[in-house]
Image (tube, grey):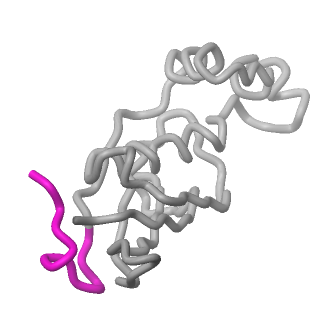
Amino acid sequence: MTVQFSDIQIGDEIPLLKLQPVNRTTLALYCGASGDHNPIHVDLDFARKSRMDDVFAHGMLSAAYLGRLLTNWVAQRQVRSLSVRFTGITQLGHIPTCTGKVIDKFLDGGEQRVRLSLHCTNQYGEEKLAGEAVVALD
């Protein structure tokens, strides 16, 4: 089903994305997929030498989850922009939940667009990533 500009109101929330708990396998797979092999994300000894209790998720993994939130709602070709700001560390066992809320509706060059406020939090409601996106709607 296509999301229609006329059906969207400021304040509307898009369907949330709740993921599985972050685990070591998730982090290892993301290392391979992204090419980001920083040992702080997969090597416990390295993490401890860096004064962390354990490894933790890549910030860009949460950014990718926000991208998935958007493309679960609209086709990728409709995404005009996505920006993020890292606000916290996603630890092993955290369950990421991504949400989006319409904060603006506007025309740009005749194209109908909405601006969304995006957030990725853990199961305790602690924000890990904040962002904003613009998508084009029919």
Residue at 29%, 86% (x, y): give it.
10
In which image quadrant can residue 29 be found?
top right
Residue at 62%, 13% (x, y): give it.
32
Nearest the viewer among 51 and 98 is: 98
Q: In this view, does 77 lie above or below 127?
A: above
Task: Return the residue found at the far right.
Answer: 49
Q: In this view, does 100 lie above or below 41?
A: below
- Residue 102 place in picture, x, y as percent: 34, 77
Q: What stretch is highlighted in magenta?
A: 1-13
- In the rendered view, does 29 fall on the left or right side of 38? left
Residue 2: in magenta span: yes
- In the rendered view, does 109 fall on the left or right side of 131? left
Residue at 22%, 65% (x, y): give it.
138
Q: In this view, does 136 lie above or below 56?
A: below
Residue 53: in magenta span: no
- Residue 66 place in picture, x, y as percent: 46, 50
- Residue 35 place in picture, x, y as percent: 70, 19
Q: Is residue 134 above or below residue 6?
A: above
- In the rendered view, does 33 fall on the left or right side of 71? right
Residue at 59%, 45% (x, y): give it.
90
Dominant SS type (magenta): loop
Nearest the viewer among 103 and 80 is: 80
Nearest the viewer among 104 and 77 is: 77
- Residue 11 place in picture, x, y as percent: 28, 84
In which image quadrant can residue 125 be found?
bottom left
